[in-house]
Image (cartoon, helix red, strand yellow):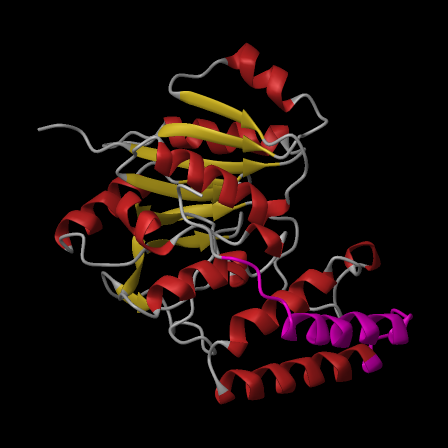
Amino acid sequence: MQRSRVAAVVVTYNRLPLLRRCLQAVLDQQGAQADLWVIDNASTDGTGEALRQWAPPRLFYQNTGGNLGGAGGFAYGVRAAARAGYDYLWLMDDDTIPEPGALAALLDADRELGGRYGWLSSRALTPEGADQPMNRQRRTPYKDIAGYEGTYIPSQMASFVSLFVRGQTVRDYGLPIAEFFIWSDDWEYTRRISRRVTCYTVPASRVMHAMKSNTVVNIAADAPARWERYRYFYRNDVYLYRREGIIGWLWLVCKFAWHSVQVLRSPAGRRLYRLGVIWKGFVAGIGFDPPVRGVEE
């Protein structure tokens, strides 16, 4: 029987030590193999030269030529791998460390489900072994899944921290939206697919997400150095939830209002600036209408 062709699409930017751990964990998968597609957003830390010297097997390195953000990097990598004709794409950030059986569990699920799914998502853990709150899948656009009991858990939204998708699904539904730059591109992409096809979380597939912060995304609680980038978060969220109709709009107003209240209660200062980021993002999202591109565009 011919082996299924899997491309592990890893987007990176200036995190070479984490990237090495991620790639080695993919190479060390048991019972399954994946080619490594490293999409480098023009790192300045020597990533390209280090990978050329390391030269692990089955590595395909592509430099995007500029920092396209996570969204642009995944759009770039998904297009490249899909055009190369892979049967499956396994998407992950450079700080994702898959356990040895993570890929095999996803392929087992693909076989048992007969390919009748939109995407599969792994269970993400913190370095301490707890469930990673930033990567808990959603059972609706508004509620997280209850837990990880069961073999396959129907889910509607998931992150790009170990997302498994068939190449044909990418050709059917298009690419992640590069114009998101950062934040919510994974939620948008997975929701775009789950609106039409049932999707699942696969608890047997486990990865460690070695991110610095385990808190939810909220300008009221984040570090000042990161405040400016929240304009993408709030704009992109409006694009995502306005597609859900009146309930989505109500969700947005309530969420943005609650974040505003939290900002006003925050001791960190620059409250008017942060309120401006929230509500300017809201206004920008109303008219934000980026194209959904296909694999061959």
The answer to whether residue 198 is above or below residue 207 is below
Seen at 43% across and 60% down, the residue is: 158
Q: Quadrant of the N terminus?
A: top left
The answer to whether residue 110 is above or below residue 103 is below
The answer to whether residue 134 is above or below residue 144 is above
266 or 195, nearer to the observer = 195
Residue 193 appears in which quarter of the rendering? Answer: bottom left
Q: Position of residue 275 (x, y in %)?
A: 81, 76
**In the rendered structure, which segment of residues is drawn in magenta?**
264-291
Decide if residue 216 is in sight here: no
185 or 148, nearer to the observer = 185
Q: In the figure, is residue 67 to the left or right of 53?
A: right
Q: Position of residue 170 (x, y in %)?
A: 34, 49
Decide if residue 44 is in sight here: yes
Q: Single out the residue that lies furthest toward the left.
A: 1
Seen at 77% across and 56% down, the residue is: 226
Seen at 62% across and 15% down, the residue is: 49
Q: Position of residue 176 (x, y in %)?
A: 48, 52
